[in-house]
Image (cartoon, rainbow, N blue to C red):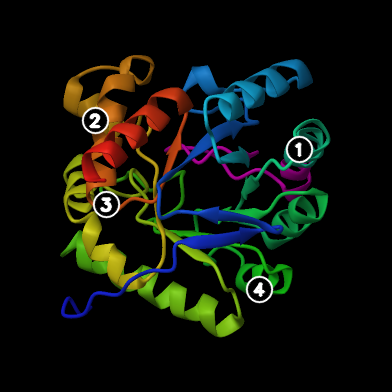
Amino acid sequence: MSLNTFFIAVMTINCNQTILDLSKPAVMGILNITPDSFFDGNRWNDEISILNQSRKMLDEGAAIIDVGGMSSRPGAQVISVEEEMQRVLPVVALLVNNFRDVVISIDTMRAEVAKAAIESGAAIVNDISAGTFDDKMIETVAALQVPYILMHKQGMPIDMQHNPVYKNVVIEVFDFLQKQVRKCKAAGIKDVIVDVGFGFGKTVEHNFLLLKNLSVFKQLNCPILIGVSRKSMITKTLSTNAESALNGTTAANTIGLMNGANILRVHDVKEAVEAVKIYCSATA
């Protein structure tokens, strides 16, 4: 890892001919189509509630809706490809048919699911494994020519929080993401977004070291996504639960914006959009 040279990242991504300019930070709203999301306030499993929640997030200013059908909370089990598809593909089609120009990201580790979701109308692939779970993912995304979100994690959700250890978490996460970005670019993926993976095989201390040093990841010359919404780094620090972690989430998101975040992945869109507005006003 070299800390000597900084680059100016290209801050636009092409999402099915919709160009998102990330020079002003954007907000990604979370739409979990799972029965076991860690936050009860973001589980949606019928058409009316899915449409109502999606409309609410879009009205509040979400630039992207992130649809996920397999929980990645600590301890979560891997489900079958068939079950994941049954959960997410109808939802992608539902959103495309009801919201004009909606930008949908599909949250999956599987190339087969990613391909089917993009063909159904999604425009971004959000892979928490950064191409390490399915060895066909990177080549599939390259063929689809859509933006790809690479996230760092240590272990799998079922065991990732069992005593995660690093010599230097910032350097190790940076080196991993740098390696995967290079693979993506070599494969022909034009738009790569990086995510340091808060809460994915990290202690509270690891998470805050990454948040403090987030600006280091600008050297990857990619937009940076952060996902701290209502996570244990906040609940453990504040001795609270996910339901009461909104204020802490806003504080962490604001620190992330100050340190270079371009996309905030959140359960609460209105508050995140307000944080972006305050940040932009203060840095104009």
Mark 1 — residue?
A: 100
Query: Disc 4 or disc 3, which is closer to the eye?
Result: 4
Which amino acid does the dot numbered 3 rest on?
A: Pro
Label 2 or label 4, whichever comes before in sequence order: 4
Label 1 or label 2, whichever comes before in sequence order: 1
Query: Which labelled disc corresponds to residue 164?
Result: 3
Mark 4 — residue?
A: 142
> Is 61 positioned to the left or the right of 223 in the image?
right
Query: Disc 2 or disc 4, which is closer to the eye?
Result: 2
Placement of the N terminus among the 4 image quadrants: bottom left
Query: Disc 1 or disc 2, which is closer to the eye?
Result: 1
Q: Nearer the viewer, residue 34 or 2?
A: 2
Q: Residue furthest bottom?
A: 186
Image coordinates of residue 167 in percent, x first then y, are 16, 64
Which amino acid does the dot numbered 1 rest on?
A: Arg
Query: Disc 1 or disc 4, which is closer to the eye?
Result: 1
Q: Which residues are magenta?
A: 68-85
Asked which secondary structure carries label 4, the reply is helix
Which amino acid does the dot numbered 2 rest on?
A: Ala
Q: Are marks 3 and 2 in contact (CB under 8 Å)?
A: no
Mark 2 — residue?
A: 251
Q: With respect to residue 65, does 4 lie above or below?
A: below
Q: With respect to residue 52, does 78 lie above or below?
A: below
Image coordinates of residue 212 in percent, x first then y, are 16, 50
Count of numbered circles on the image: 4
Identify the residue at image location x=45%, y=24%. Answer: 270
Label 3 or label 1, whichever comes before in sequence order: 1
Badge 2: residue crowd in 10 Å (few <14, some 14–19, many ≥20): some
Asked which secondary structure carries label 2, the reply is helix
Label 3 or label 2, whichever comes before in sequence order: 3
